[in-house]
Image (cartoon, rainbow, N blue to C red):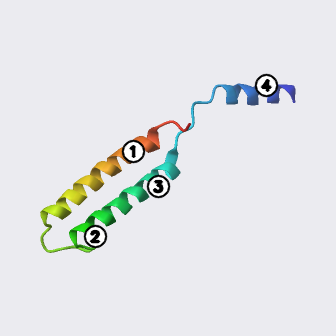
Amino acid sequence: MKYKSIAVFLLTATAGPAVAGPIGYAICQTGCNGIAVACYSAAGFTFGVAAPAAPPAIIACNAALGACMAACALVALGPTP
């Protein structure tokens, strides 16, 4: 029993830092999508509905959404405080 307690202590003492993981990533993506919906609405379009040709405002919204989603990858990989 004593050896098991020592083994558990050593495993927890040498464990690496926790990361935000999928929940932090999902929260970040939800925020990005909320901003994209607001951007589309401000441009007079509905998010998720395909248009025959994308106007410049929608292209800018998509570029901002892509940058936000890329930043979410850092959230998923960053340490949890």
Query: For this view, does 39 lie left or right of residue 55?
Result: right
Between the residue at mark 3 and the residue at mark 1, the CA separation in whole angstroms equals 10 Å
> Which class describes the residues within 10 Å of circle 2: few (<14), some (14-19), or many (20+)?
few
| Residue 27 point in image, percent of width and height | 47, 55
Q: Disc 3 or 2, which lies upstream in sequence?
A: 3
Q: Are marks 4 and 1 in contact (CB under 8 Å)?
A: no
From the image, state whether disc 4 or disc 1 is nearer to you. 1
Residue that numbered label 4 is attached to: 6
Between the residue at mark 2 and the residue at mark 4, the CA separation in whole angstroms equals 59 Å
Q: Residue at x 40, y 41 (%)?
A: 74
From the image, state whether disc 3 or disc 2 is nearer to you. 2
From the image, state whether disc 1 or disc 2 is nearer to you. 2
> Which class describes the residues within 10 Å of circle 1: few (<14), some (14-19), or many (20+)?
some
| Residue 16 point in image, percent of width and height | 58, 30
Residue that numbered label 3 is attached to: 26
Q: Disc 1 or 2, which lies upstream in sequence?
A: 2
